[in-house]
Amino acid sequence: MLTDEDRARIATAYEACQIADLARLAITTRDPATALAQAHQLLATAHHLLEAAHAYAHGTNPPERFAATHPEEAADDIADWLLRHHEGELDHKAGTFPRIR
């Protein structure tokens, strides 16, 4: 059974992965309108990360978004993301994300 803290940790990590993916897309954007839209999306996702991190820091339930309502699937997505983006600088003790299922 997952605790509120578990859900908040998963939500925090999930939103961080989303930010990283959005930032990576923004690097190659050549259209100003697309860049602006991506920046807005990054800001919104950063706000979601802040809300999730706040919940994690206080041991409370994170806002009802995908990672909070589907924590097992989100944890699997995070584990997959970490495998895809491993660049040799990941601390294997602190940087892994265990699968829940």
Image: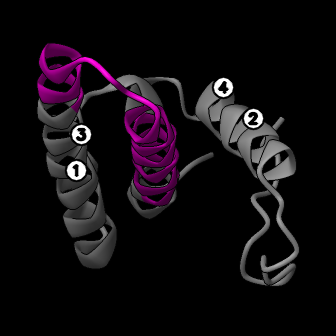
Marks 4/1: CA distance? 21 Å
- The amino acid beneath tag 2 is Asp
- The amino acid beneath tag 1 is Ala
Q: Residue at x 75, y 59 (%)?
A: 97
| Boundaries of the magenta span | 9-38
* Mark found first going from the N terminus, 2 or 3: 3
Q: Residue at x 14, y 49 (%)?
A: 47
Cβ atoms under marks 1 and 3 closer than 8 Å: yes
**For residue 76, what is the image quadrant?**
top right
List x then y, in percent, for residue 72: 66, 32
Magenta span includes 31 = yes
- The amino acid beneath tag 3 is Leu
Camera-side mark, 1 or 2: 1
List x then y, in percent, for residue 54: 20, 67
* Mark found first going from the N terminus, 4 or 3: 3
Q: Which residue matches tag 1?
A: 46
Observer-nearest of 69 and 20: 20
Observer-nearest of 53 and 18: 18
The local secondary structure at tag 4 comes to helix
**Mainly helix, strand or loop, the magenta region?**
helix
Q: Which residue matches tag 3?
A: 42
The local secondary structure at tag 1 comes to helix
Q: Which residue matches tag 2?
A: 76
- Figure disc tally: 4
Q: Which residue matches tag 4?
A: 73
Cβ atoms under marks 2 and 3 closer than 8 Å: no
List x then y, in percent, for residue 21: 51, 38
* Mark found first going from the N terminus, 4 or 1: 1
Cβ atoms under marks 2 and 4 closer than 8 Å: yes
